[in-house]
Every structure is written in C-alpha cells, then in structure tokens.
Amino acid sequence: MSKKITINHECIILDACVLMNLYASRELKSILSSISESCAATFYVVNYEALTILNYKSNKSVPKNEEKIDLETIIAQGLLHLTNFESDQEKKSFLSFSSQRLDDGEAASMAIAKHRNWAFASDDKRATKIMRSFDQNIQIVSTPEILRHWQLVQNPNTLVMKNVIQEIEMRANFTLGRKNPDFIWWQNIKNI
C-alpha cells in the first residue's frame, strides 16, 4: 500500500543520496512533478556530490561506465531549484552540522532546511538522527517515502515500479536496510 506524503513545509531540500537515487530511477521528472511543494538542492550537492551514477551493460551485472548526472532540463523546467546560503545563521549552522562528521552537502542541506523551515530529504541515518536532535519540527523524508508518494499520485504500473527500484539499487548503488519501515514494501515491489 502506498502513502501520500503530507509535507508541512513549502519546500523539500534533497541531499545528494536522495537526488542520486531519484535520478537513477529514470523517472526523476515524473517523481518531482508528483510533489506539490517545491524541491531544491544546494549548489554544493549538485556541483560536487551528485555527479555520476553507474551505467550498466545490457546484462546489468557489470557496470559499463559512470553516467554524468544531468539536471539541466529538470532545473530549467522549475522542478528543482538550486539554492545556497542566504544568511550568516545558515553558514553557522552549516559549520555546526559539519562538525558532526557529515558530508558538506548534507550539512549545507540541513542548515538551509533548519533556517528556512524546509523539509529535509535524506537516506543517511546519521544525518537524519542529527537533524532530529537539532530541530524536531523539520520533517524528514526518504527515497522510499518519496517513491511511495509518487506511486499513489502518478499510479505507475507495477512493472515501472519494479524497474524504478531496480534502477535505484543498481545505478545509485542504494540498498534499503531491513530495519527501514518501508523495507517490506520495497521488497514486495522488487519481487513482482
């Protein structure tokens, strides 16, 4: 069963992992279109972290090469907005989050989410735990939650959903842990 995300913020800021996962799905445009709130990523995430995904040969067992992530069209269409620090408070929070042994992209995304009251999209357990400890009011969403929302809103057929999960696992090298609340849903889609 899918569930629609209710976002209590005007924007969702995507960290590198979520952005790479959604891009790897080959359905990024459709997925972002299903979200009524705006979606953003930091310049740092787009220019330094979410750079490539794996590109597989037809047998899908050996990577052929890396594929450059191209967000130009999605940005031009207004489905993804680029953002950067707009205040000294955001910069200070970035330094504070960075000191917690987080990637710079995660730290920047978290600082912006905190000060602009935006939702934060991440699959990183450490980042989400730290974000919750800093601000309980910031909504945190994950790749599976975004996909479940997309499934409900856009209603892709089961084969498309299965391909999306497989593409994310292979091209973004993403694995959903057994303790994740969406693990059974993920496995059920994967095993269709």
Image (cartoon, grey):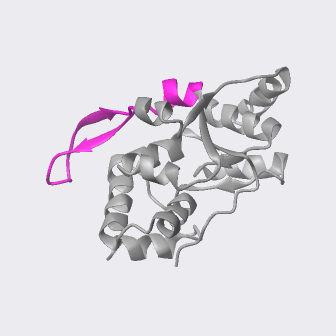
- Residue at position x 83%, y 45% in the image: 134
Residue 45 belongs to the span the image colors magenta? yes
Q: Residue furthest front?
A: 77
Q: Is residue 1 above or below residue 57?
A: below
**Quick one: 73 or 158, which is closer to the camera?**
73
Where residue 93 sits: x, y (%)?
80, 30
Magenta part of the protein: which range? 43-70
Residue 26 belongs to the span the image colors magenta? no
Q: Residue 102: name its quadrant.
A: top right
Where residue 135 sits: x, y (%)?
84, 48
Query: Is 42 placed left or right of 61 in the picture?
Result: right
Query: Is 25 placed left or right of 94 in the picture?
Result: left
Q: Residue furthest left?
A: 58
Where residue 139 sits: x, y (%)?
74, 54
Q: Quadrant of the C terminus?
A: bottom left
Q: Residue 179: name its quadrant.
A: bottom right
Q: Is residue 129 above or below residue 155?
A: above
